[in-house]
Amino acid sequence: VIYVYAIGEHAGRLTAFVKRGVTAPPSAEPEALLDHDRVVYSLMERGTVLPMRFGSVVGDEAEIRSLLLERRSELKRLLAHVRGRVEFGVRRDLPAVAGSGREYMQTKLESQRTVAPLAELAVDTRVRAKDTAYLVDRGLADTFRERVRGMKLAFTGPWPPYSFTGGLDG
Amino acid sequence: VSEALVPGREVTLVDIVDRLLGGGVVISGEITLAVADIDLVHVSLRALVASVEKVAGS
């Protein structure tokens, strides 16, 4: 099979960044996860990419070409959206299910207080299970980091835009 | 497991698992054979994409 790391552009054309000669889809072992992360991050430093979910494989080249062709307008739109931008994750240490109504309101207000000052530095946000993802212009990345640190919040990144790939649970 | 794995990035293995398995483009749906102006680029892992080799155009 062919392992697909990311979709991007090469010489102005929609491009899949792949590894050939893979015998089976990799299991989610640390080494394989780190490999995927490093490769996609390196690709992002060279150009605009949409990361693939870990473990994405196709049978052959025709399959990936067809996939890109079928979804080309969506993929090109997403690539334009993430161009020149990186993702940061900012953790929310909030209960997923709040006990009382009052607790819920406090949680919601607290969440709004932390999100708004960060969202104004981002072009897009996604609420994820454990954190909120912010899509930030590279030029504003340092400013964003400083603001998060100033707010005493824990963050991760910069990431390739894993949460801005249009996936159902991305 | 809280020290940074990657220089210059605030990233732990737990964060990587969360991002890589919860995000990214998902391959789905029916695949039909077609010709496109799409390139495939072979990623050389020898130096972690120090070189990206183009192997197929159309």
Image (spheres, rainbow, N blue to C red):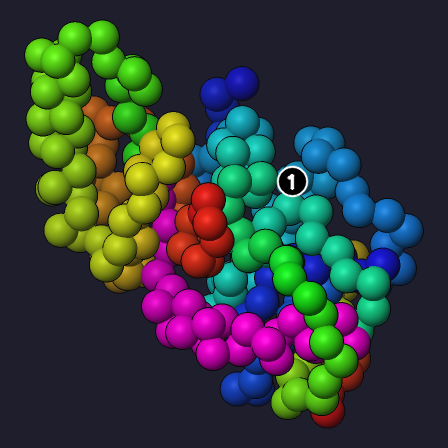
Quarter of the figure with residue A127: top left
Q: Which residues fall within the magenta stretch?
A: A62-89
Q: In the image, residue A128 lies at what x, y percent?
A: 37, 37
Whether residue A120 sits left or right of residue B20 in the image: it is: left
Q: Is residue B42 left or right of residue A84?
A: right
* Extreme residue in the top direction: A99
Mark 1 highlights which residue? Answer: A34
Where residue A31 appears, x then y in whole percent? 72, 36
Magenta stretch: dominant SS? helix
Labels in figure, total? 1
Which residue is at 12% across, 13% downward?
A101
Residue beneath the point at 49% across and 24% down: B3
User: Which of B58/B12 is in front?
Assistant: B58
| Residue B7 in view of the camera | no
Residue A130 to residue A81: above or below: above
Q: Is residue B46 visible?
A: yes
Above or below — where is A121 with respect to A127?
Answer: below
Q: Position of residue B15 (x, y in %)?
A: 49, 32
Residue drawn at x 34%, y 32% as measured from the top left: A131
> Secondary structure under badge 1?
helix
Query: For this view, does A135 lie left or right of residue B29?
Result: left
Q: Quadrant of residue B9?
A: top left
Figure quadrant of residue A57? bottom right
Residue at image coords 76%, 71%: A63
* Residue A102 picture location, percent across and down: 9, 12
- Counting other residues with Cα less than 10 Å from the Cα at mark 1, is it few (<14), some (14-19), or many (20 or more)? some
What is the chain identity of the residue bearing mark 1? A
Of the residues shown, which amino acid type is indicated by label 1? Answer: Leu
For the N terminus of chain A, which image quadrant? bottom right
